[in-house]
Image: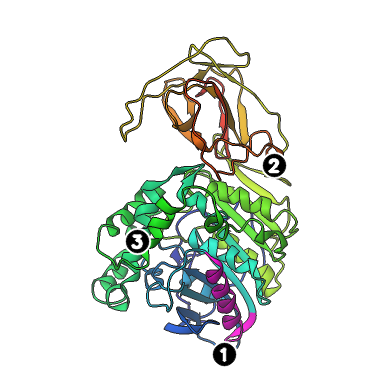
Amino acid sequence: MARVKAAGLEPGQRQLNGPQTTGRQYRNLSLALHGTTREDNVPVPVRDGAQLLADIHRPDADGRFPALIAAAPYPRQLQDLGAPAAVIEAGTSDFWVPRGYAHVIANLRGTVGSGGTYTFFDEQERKDLFDLVEWVAGQPWCDGNVGMIGISYYAMSQLEAATQRPPHLKALFPFNVTVRVREAAYHNGLLSESFITPWIHALGVLSAHGDRLYRKGLSRLLRRFLAIPAIHRRFSHTDGVQATRGLRLVSRFRHDPHPWNALLDAVATEHPTRDAWWDERDLTELLAGVDIPVYLGGEWSNVPLHLTGLFDAWDALADNPQVRMTMLGEYSLPWPWESMHIEALAWFDHWLKGRDTGILEGPAVRYWLPGAEQWRTTDSWPPPATHIALALNADGSLTADEQPGERSYATDGANTMPAQLSWTSDPLPDDLDMVGHPELRLTATSSGADTAWILLLQDVGPDGKAADITQGWLRAGMRHVDEAASETGRPVLPTKTRVPIPAGEPVDYRIPLVANARRFHRGTASG
């Protein structure tokens, strides 16, 4: 039998970057047996008469195959470029197609040639995704079993589609997901301007181009260069900071004002608090009735964007018995995204092909514990644990017993990071595993009508070097807590109203930090 060109981990295959499993061995996985045929710019009709454009990669053999859909506003033509760019997140076709899956990469409405106007994660987008799933299921090359794949926006669109209950959607694999899209733009009332502004502008720029730029000329040469194994390996640890620099660069180019300028105005100016506009884009309640299998995943280092959404999705799907979740170590989902494909293959082989792969064996949650460098498992999230409370003291110490006193700092109101206060615990007498949701309870007085609280939790080594673990944010004017819905470590902040701080009066705050995990070693400190 002639060797098939395919990506994977076997000798002779194009080697995949990034971790591929959660430390487990699987069985009965589909082998790379098929060549690939491809159709570009295939129109997909949706119910209002618009047409989405899709690239379809499928096995070059007779018969019908399960299909995996990846849908987002990012250029479908670039998903096989091999560049370390934050828009290449649909998964790698040369892994899936040889193993007997069609890989359908579609552009959402109003982006990169798809008809209609981009509407940003709303009901129209969800209806389009229902129509896309059912169209794919009805094609002569599809056996009617449809899954969805991809990270970030490609993950969010999976949950969007699931809320519509398309009958042929059988399994999802959303990694780095956000359920409440407002959280991609605001951190508890603080605008994430360094992300959302360049992201929207970059969408406008990227959507204005097509095949001439993305498939021909320089792009074709770049594909060949990036496919060189030694070059490809250099991207195996591309982190979010590196990858999003490209978005900022792209955002500097000109784009059509419609609809992008209006969208930025809506996000950054017209809807600073949670209101009906944001609620339309919140999947929390819509996910409550979803019963198809969902494998959620994320990485501990994705604190500023998707990590909170991962646990929101887990909570929203609490009544679904076919949900699994994993948290990976630092920077385990590098770009171009092709990590965790073996894990995904075990998942889709089980649900779309009926193979006994072993993917469902063991507890529902697996997570990497940094510091211990081990996989851990639990049947629930957060896992059963003891809550530890430490007090912020006037002398800068963190101790079990609170000491009287106060600390203060001044800021000039400039658009720069103000003065900081820090607290550090004593060196630990023994190793300590922190797993779950930290929270700061703070009583503070301010001379201004509003302020921003920005928190950073670090692991401080004996040499004084600090490693960042997680962060928390709060606009003080949006401090109201829904106590009835809150738990220890997980205050719920509706951010529906903005109430000025009473000048000179002490105010109590509950500020969540993004959930994380870490082994603090003996002799280290937290701060």
Three-letter code, disc 2: Ala
Three-letter code, disc 3: Asn
**Crowd around label 3: few <14 · some 14–19 · many ≥20 (10 Å):** some
Q: Is residue 472 visible?
A: no
Real-space CA distance between mark 1 and mark 3, rounded to the nearest whole angstrom? 47 Å
Secondary structure beneath dot 2 equals helix
- The residue where tag 2 is placed is 485
What percent of the width, then of the height, locates residue 332?
A: 49, 50
Above or below 361: residue 436: above
Tell whether position 50 is magenta. Answer: no
Of the two numbered discs 1 and 2 in the rendering, the one whose residue sits closer to the viewer? 2
- Nearest to N terminus: mark 3 or mark 2: 3
- Nearest to N terminus: mark 1 or mark 3: 1
Of the two numbered discs 1 and 3 in the rendering, the one whose residue sits closer to the viewer? 3
Real-space CA distance between mark 3 and mark 2, rounded to the nearest whole angstrom? 36 Å
Secondary structure beneath dot 1 equals loop
Above or below 516: residue 342: below
Real-space CA distance between mark 1 and mark 2, rounded to the nearest whole angstrom? 54 Å
> Residue 261: which disc?
3
Tell which of 77 and 397 is nearer to you. Answer: 397
- The residue where tag 1 is placed is 62
**Crowd around label 1: few <14 · some 14–19 · many ≥20 (10 Å):** few
Q: Residue at x 60, y 17 (%)?
A: 429
Which range is magenta?
A: 122-144
Secondary structure beneath dot 3 equals helix
Tell which of 404 and 18 is nearer to you. Answer: 404
> Residue 145: which disc?
none
By secondary structure, the bulk of the magenta-drawn segment is best described as helix
What percent of the width, then of the height, locates residue 357?
A: 69, 64
Tell which of 317 and 463 is nearer to you. Answer: 317
Three-letter code, disc 1: Asp
